[in-house]
Amino acid sequence: MSNAEVLGRFVWHELLTNDTAGAAAFYPKVLPWRTAPSSMPGYTIWMAGQTQIGGLMALPSEAGSTPPHWLVYVGTPNVDSTCSQAQGLGARIVKPPADIPNVGRFAVLSDPQGATFAVFTPGGGPPPGTPPVQGGFSWHELATTDVAAALRFYGQLFGWTKGPGHDMGAMGIYQLFEHGGTQAGGICNVQGPSTAPSWLSYVHIADSGRAVAAAKAAGGRLLHGPMEVPGGSWIAMMMDPQGGAFAVQEAPRAAQSKPAAAAKPAAAKPARAAKSPAAAKPAAAPAKPAAAAPAAAAVKRVVGARVAKRAKKGGRKVRRTARKTARKVRRTGRKVARRAARPGVRRAVRKAARKTARAVRRGGRRVARRARVAGRRVRRAARRRR
């Protein structure tokens, strides 16, 4: 692959973590990977079959409170000119351009919205190997605060073009982007003001359910899924025991022999970056994915169930209040009756108290019935949304 052909390709993926030994033990249990040593001290290579697909290194000391994260590397013919162009477009240099002996040149940047990524110019060396059927990175997803601005920035920097957009309801538009006419990833809104913009990478695997079970058994955490997305693919988002977010994508189960499909919007752990890769052997272009999956339906089901539960709880509270009020009225009536001097007055007071109590009970029952009806309507609406 020439330097001209590398522009805009995702060529490397690097995990920076505070426990490299733990990460090296965790990921091969979940993904079809193994580790291999590199020529650089403290740097481990991720292998999928015979293909180098990424690296593993410790978070550098200058990273401060930066949590463990995956860093994506995008190819460019000239790292230095790309950094200058990115700064002119509003990006910030996190790590200035530097050489990796016998490997290439790289730099780490933060885009105008705050998502961290790296750029890489490969040096001389053998061409990349055949992309692995299983274990390769198949989709890349950017969660950002401004989808349109992010698309313009990366489009000018790497030549990515706008693909189809998918309306996710309250979550906004999930915007696909293309590289060389092939869908390469998606851009979506961050989910919540406390979530920082970041990149999330998907790994192509044979069985998403098995990967989730293995991740949980090894101390990881499931963030979302497994769920089927348009096109038939199955995806799941997880977090490793150290806090690094990643995702998996399974090909359509009814047609495993077809090209890998893929992806769905997600919210990933914030990525703030640090240091260089070691033996950066570029990976081949990702498989073409299918359209993004709307997660809005899942959100609506959860919200509907919560509303129904609150309505039911409110009905019980109204009934309890009505009974309590009726008891107070009866007690007050009896007390007044005892204090009355004449039998006629006592009878009138008791009669009035009973009448008031009956009216309160009827009112309470009416309110309770309305609450039950409202609850049933909410539950029916929630079922229809499913």
Image (cartoon, grey):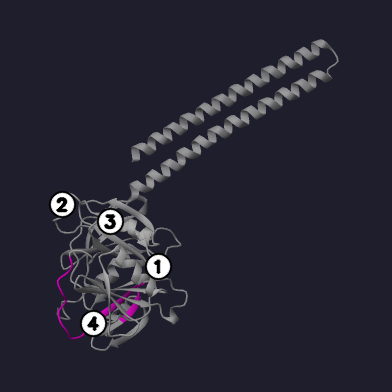
Could you tell me how far apart the alpha carbons at marks 4 and 3 are, in whole angstroms?
33 Å
Callout 2 amino acid:
Ala
Furthest residue toward right? 341
Whether 99 is drawn above or below 6: the answer is: below
Label of residue 208 in the image: 3
Callout 1 amino acid:
Pro
SS under mark 4: strand
Q: Position of residue 308 (x, y in %)?
A: 45, 38
Disc 2: which residue: 255
Could you tell me how far apart the alpha carbons at marks 2 and 3 are, in whole angstroms?
15 Å
Front in this rendered view, residue 19 or 70: 19
Could you tell me how far apart the alpha carbons at marks 3 and 1 are, in whole angstroms?
23 Å
Label of residue 121 in the image: 4
Could you tell me how far apart the alpha carbons at marks 4 and 1 are, in whole angstroms?
25 Å
Front in this rendered view, residue 48 or 102: 48
Report the magenta residues as a range: 107-132
**Mark in front: 4 vs 2:** 2
Q: Residue 4: name its quadrant.
A: bottom left
Report the side of 379 relative to 347 (left or right).
Answer: left
Label of residue 131 in the image: none
Callout 4 amino acid:
Thr
Disc 1: which residue: 270
Report the side of 323 relative to 89 (left or right).
Answer: right
Q: Earlier in the sequence, mark 2 or mark 3?
A: 3
Could you tell me how far apart the alpha carbons at marks 2 and 1 are, in whole angstroms?
35 Å
Report the residue at 66% width, 25% height from top. 326
SS under mark 3: helix
Q: Earlier in the sequence, mark 4 or mark 2?
A: 4
Whether 304 is drawn above or below 291: the answer is: above
Report the residue at 38% width, 76% height from top. 273
